[in-house]
Amino acid sequence: PPLGAMVNLNDIEESAKKVLSSTAWGYYASSSETENSHLNNLASFKRYWFRPRVLREVGQVDMSATFLGIPTSLPIFVCPAAMAGLGHPLGEVNITRGAGRTGIIQGISSNASCTVDEVAEARTEGQPLVYQLYLTKDRAVSERMVKRIEELGFRAIMFTVDAPVLGKRELDMKSKPVASETGGGNVAGSLAGYFDVNIGWKDVVWLRSITKLPIILKGIQTVEDVEIAADYGVDGVLLSNHGGRQLDFAPAAIDVLYELRQKRPDLMDKMEIYLDGGVRRGTDVLKALCLGAKGVGLGRPFLFANGAYGEEGVVRVVQILEEEIGIGMRLLGVRSLGELRPEMVQAIDARVH
Ligand code: FNR
């Protein structure tokens, strides 16, 4: 179906399912074991309902934000996700171009199909990029990588901390009929091995010591670890269960955010809090912002859009979210993101599935 017929992000996912190779679909769509982490990510937003205000003169709304001081047209970013090249020959570069055209920030995976030099080359003037780091066993390799992305003008590092081992992703495993003897025949398996599985908080100290770039810890899943992250002086945390691809039955980020809002709202003044996982609607974004998130990331929707429609698909994803966020803000009675307040959402049992 033509891109113009895509009304929401689920439509784009349906298109991707029809056109992607089984390897690409298997790798992108898979989540771990019973898939409950991912399914719960999607369902979690239905547990939060709005308390909208009216008669607030919402003729003009401003959807712009800053992440770590970096301006963004919308409070959303592209999550770092590996292997955009499985879905489209131009890989991450397409997403970089789409992000540039729409004014949002893109995270580049350590396992991107394109090199950091290629994505940097595809930027528009001043377009911000963030680098997602997995630590290699040989720290000198990681250190050289950090220096390279600093030279290229990347603006921050997302240090992924939820992957000491890869989750068991069964759709991905099944999408390759002949697995190698070691079981590493699937896409995810072939990416492991090179990275250090034995990382600890000392490595956050190490990373802080080798770069002045802002550091966001990606993959924090409890209030306890947000507290530790604050003690270690990182600039932000990304509440995430890796799109449900790591621990099965891991908490949805919006639930962790809700608990953080109740127990330690003070930490939201110390660090910037982000979330990802299952965000598919403008209202999902607004709920997270009401509860104190600075911004919200999306992973699969950009891979699916790139796979099915290339750069134009990436732009369309952002346009759909922009429209939905704008409608949502007006109907909530806010004119800027700063007016979104915790009292504008309430947690309740899901009413609709
Ligand atoms: C990811 N994600 C991820 N995260 C990371 O830190 N490094 C990586 O290389 C990857 N690779 C990756 C590949 C694919 C195919 C997916 C779907 C995801 C996780 C990603 O950054 C993000 O946390 C989730 O994608 C968010 O969930 P949704 O939006 O996909 O539901």
Image: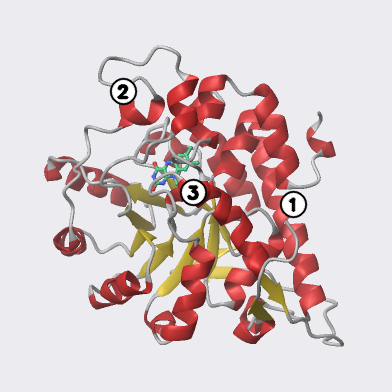
Instruction: Kindly tell me whether residue 287 is visible in this rendering.
Output: yes
Amino acid under label 3? Gly
Q: Residue 121: x, y in percent?
A: 45, 38
Rounded to the nearest whole Å, what is the CA distance between mark 3 and mark 2?
A: 21 Å
SS under mark 2:
loop
Location of residue 350 by image quarter: bottom right
Rounded to the nearest whole Å, what is the CA distance between mark 1 and mark 3?
A: 21 Å
Amino acid under label 2? Gly
Rounded to the nearest whole Å, what is the CA distance between mark 1 and mark 2?
A: 37 Å
Residue 170 vertical placement versus 8 (above, below): above
Instruction: Kindly tell me whether residue 90 is visible in this rendering.
Output: no
Q: Nearer the viewer, residue 105 or 148?
A: 105
Q: Residue 145: x, y in percent?
A: 25, 43
Res 320 label: 1
| Position of residue 335 in the picture relative to residue 4 (left or right) | left
Amino acid under label 1? Ile
Ligand 1 closer than 8 Å to the CB at disc 3? yes
Among numbered discs 1 and 2, the one appearing first in the sequence: 2
Task: Name the residue carrying label 2.
Answer: 184
Q: Residues within 10 Å of mark 1 (few under 14, many from 20)?
A: some
Among numbered discs 1 and 3, the one appearing first in the sequence: 3
Q: Residue 28: x, y in percent?
A: 52, 34
Res 243 label: 3
Which residue: 45% across, 13% down? 177
Residue 275 vertical placement versus 243 (above, below): below
